[in-house]
Amino acid sequence: YTGSLTLSFVLCRRKMPADAVIQMDTKTLGDIKMRQMGFFARNMKSLMAAMSIVVALLLFAIPDPTHQGSEIYNSPLVTNGPTEINDFSDARGSYKRHVYVEGDEGIYVNLAFTKKGFLRSGDIHDCEQVNHIVFGRGTLTRLVRGSEVVDKLNGGQTVVIAPHVPHLYDFFEDTLMTEYWRHPHTKFPCQYKAWYYTPFRDRIPPHTSLPH
């Protein structure tokens, strides 16, 4: 056997006890195993890092299913809306602006209080609209690629409406929510501008509402 010849050769040449050679071989095998484990650990880290990059690229590449182009503004169902918004109150409740840095793209947040049974919005924006439902309950209807999509909302939820997406809020309880607009890529504040989507806007009784 090759193993026996090697062991005899080592014993004769170095005059070392057999158990010493066996101990040395065991230590060598242990070192090899440790090196192998280190190799696999290093490669596993590299593999995990590569997988993370691939997943991030895939997520980045997957389009937002609610994303729509600006062609909707050419529709006869879309009309010009307000280009600025101020504090106001109407039959639905109240709307208050809180500005911390002045300017078209300054830092601000709006608070909208809406009574049970009333609706808001029915419009479109060329930036993302972000709403946080502080208290209350209702639904959000969006027009996504020609179909109406309705989502239930409860207190504590945050909603991000993609640019160019017509939307309408319907409140089932007295509801307080925040509202602001931001650029979809930079997430910096965006100047307010609105267009009305007639099929949604017409659902809001005109005698109950001001422009927003």
Image (cartoon, rainbow, N blue to C red):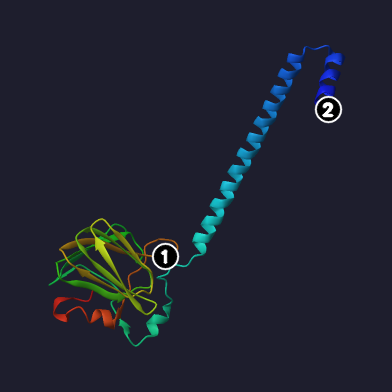
SS of the residue at dot 1?
loop
Q: Which residue is mark 1?
A: 184
As shown in the figure, which amino acid type bears the numbered disc 1?
Answer: Pro
Where in the figure is residue 164, as x and y percent of width and height? 38, 74
User: In the rendered view, does 185 fall on the left or right side of 200?
Assistant: right
62 shown above or below 204: above
The answer for how far apart the CA atoms under marks 1 and 2 are is: 71 Å
**Residue 2 marker:** 2
As shown in the figure, which amino acid type bears the numbered disc 2?
Answer: Thr
Where in the figure is residue 211, as x and y percent of width and height? 22, 76
SS of the residue at dot 2?
helix
Q: Is residue 103 visible?
A: no
Quarter location, residue 102: bottom left
190 shown above or below 7: below
Farthest-out residue, left: 91
Residue at image x 80%, y 12%? 16
Residue at image x 19%, y 76%? 210
Q: Nearer the viewer, residue 19 or 123?
A: 19
Q: Tag count in the figure? A: 2
How crowded is the residue under tag 1: few (<14 C-alpha within 10 Å), some, or many (20+)?
A: some
> Which of the marked residues, 1 or 2, is nearer the chain's N terminus?
2
102 shown above or below 26: below
Q: Nearer the viewer, residue 210 or 84?
A: 210
User: In the rendered view, does 70 fall on the left or right side of 210?
Assistant: right
Where in the figure is residue 52, as x and y percent of width and height? 54, 51
Quarter location, residue 112: bottom left
Residue at image x 37%, y 80%? 146
Q: Is disc 1 in contact with disc 2, using a CB cutoff of under 8 Å?
A: no
